[in-house]
Image (cartoon, rainbow, N blue to C red):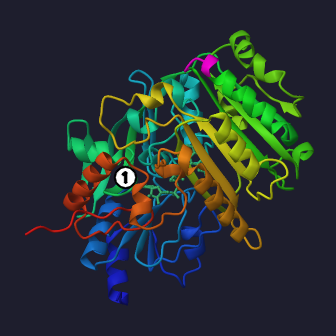
Amino acid sequence: MLVNDDIHALSKAVSGPVVLPDSPEFAEETFAFNVATVHRPDVVLGAADAQDVATAVKWAAEHRLPVSVQSTGHGANSAIDGGLLINTRRLQDLQIDPVERTARVGAGVKWRTVLEASVPHGLVGLHGSSTDVGVVGYTVGGGLPVLGRAHGFAADHVRSMDIVTADGALRRIDADAEAELFALMCGGKGNFGIVTALEFSLFPLGDFYGGGIIYPGADADLIFAAFRKWLPTLPDDASPSISLLRLPDMDFVPPPLRAKFVVHLRFAYMGNREDGDALLAPMRTVSTPLMDTAGPMDYLDVDQIHMDPADPLPFTDGGALLKDLGEETVAQLLELAGEGSDCPLLLVEIRPLGGALAQGGALADAVSGRDAAFLLFLVGFNIPPMAAASIASIREILAAMAPHSTGYTLVNFHGEPGDEADRARAWSPAVYERMRSAKTTYDPGNLLRFGHAITGLPATG
Ligand SMILES: Cc1cc2nc3c(=O)[nH]c(=O)nc-3n(C[C@H](O)[C@H](O)[C@H](O)COP(=O)(O)OP(=O)(O)OC[C@H]3O[C@@H](n4cnc5c(N)ncnc54)[C@H](O)[C@@H]3O)c2cc1C
């Protein structure tokens, strides 16, 4: 049990604030974008620099306190109960090297901040559907980018990271220095340490064409049939996705779409208007769109492609990797989630994979699921009275899709972590075994045991 002297010793040793549950700052320091999740650690450190993280981890190890980390709370799928929570939001260092085409960010930096600094140099990073997400949490989870089919997963393009391992040591790791730890941190989530800074590649930005088409939900079967035929005609430079949206009557939804059931086609393409229009043409005539925003796009408007909620909200989610999107798969999905179903979910999304996502980078990183053809992702409100129905619907759809699934998921889309077998679904068996071995080496006391944590190998001898 922690006593006042222990807390005092930590406060004296770090520069950032040490916050206890009875302090007025506790709610702010533990706040998560997913407001359904309320964290209750024993103590929070608002880390001011990497040294604070190292000092606090060492302190926690000495007191046998488990350690968790949060920057934005976009990935707060489960509550942190007890232990030390390290909040990294103050770690805002950002350097863009336009010659080397790299960015180096502190662990509190969000994707929007990177783009605002890199786009003037004609460079972009491999962010996902919302640039409000933290770069580090997203990337250590693999990071499935909007332009993933063109460039691969964000984790495939990490150059180096600064990480505090469970022994409190601050290490700079890369493909040469502690290569296996580095490879497994690229996709293995926060299992082996707390990242304080990340360096990654940026990509040249030429013409950019993007946006979305929103159709009436009643035409979902026609639109999905057309989508299936259209996909094989696209180059890897084009990254589409499609979703069924039950839009709430809320401010973040454009007024004409509030409280409507619609199909949302998203399209991101590194190319000019003429080519973008030509690629998208078959999908413009399938049904009468309620809204069509696709066209040449200022890259800083990239969040308009997916139109993810920008403000915190209470949600629950879940996902699975699919082998195919055949007629039968679509028919089953629409039966459970299409018009006329009692599906309560806000979002039922299909993201095609393939292209560079299937190939991987030079490093044998921890991103699994490269053999999958699609990602299915489900999101519902997690607030009474909808919470129970959302959770039941996610379970029902995942169970119905099981025959079409590879049996695995991506950790960033896994949803609430269940038992060990469930958590293991986020990695291939081969990667999972490598991760267990590394966990035994780098976190033998299982200090980092929250969220999508794995356990090490049993002791031998
Ligand atoms: C609206 C929305 C859109 C999204 N779109 C995409 C997408 O397109 N592609 C995609 O791949 N994912 C996407 N995600 C999932 C997102 O990438 C994950 O939830 C990710 O974990 C968020 O990271 P964070 O740091 O913002 O969140 P946090 O909740 O702060 O962190 C989540 C977890 O990341 C790990 N982590 C965070 N910081 C560190 C650190 N410094 N060191 C080690 N581990 C750390 C920890 O395990 C932590 O529990 C989306 C999520 C939301 C809510």
Residue 231 visible in the snapshot: yes
In the shown orientation, is residue 7 left or right of residue 441? Answer: right
Image position of 344 with respect to 103: above or below:
below
Judging depth in this view, the residue of 284 and 121 nearest the camera is 284
- Whole-percent x, y for residue 321 in the image: 52, 44
Range of the magenta residues?
A: 232-236
- Whole-percent x, y for residue 261 in the image: 84, 47
Q: Residue placed at 32% from the left, 84% from the top? A: 6
Q: Quadrant of the C terminus?
A: bottom left
Q: Quadrant of the N terminus?
A: bottom left
Residue underneath mark 1: 195
- Whole-percent x, y for residue 101 in the image: 43, 25
Q: Is mark 1 within 8 Å of ligand 1?
A: yes
Looking at the image, the residue that sits furthest to the right is: 256
* Magenta: main secondary structure: loop
Residue 309 visible in the snapshot: no
Q: Residue placed at 69% from the left, 48% from the top? A: 348
- Number of numbered discs overlaid on the protein picture: 1
Amino acid type, label 1: Val
- Whole-percent x, y for residue 151 in the image: 48, 26
Image position of 12 with respect to 33: above or below:
below
> Which quadrant of the figure has residue 326?
top right
Looking at the image, the residue that sits furthest to the left is: 461
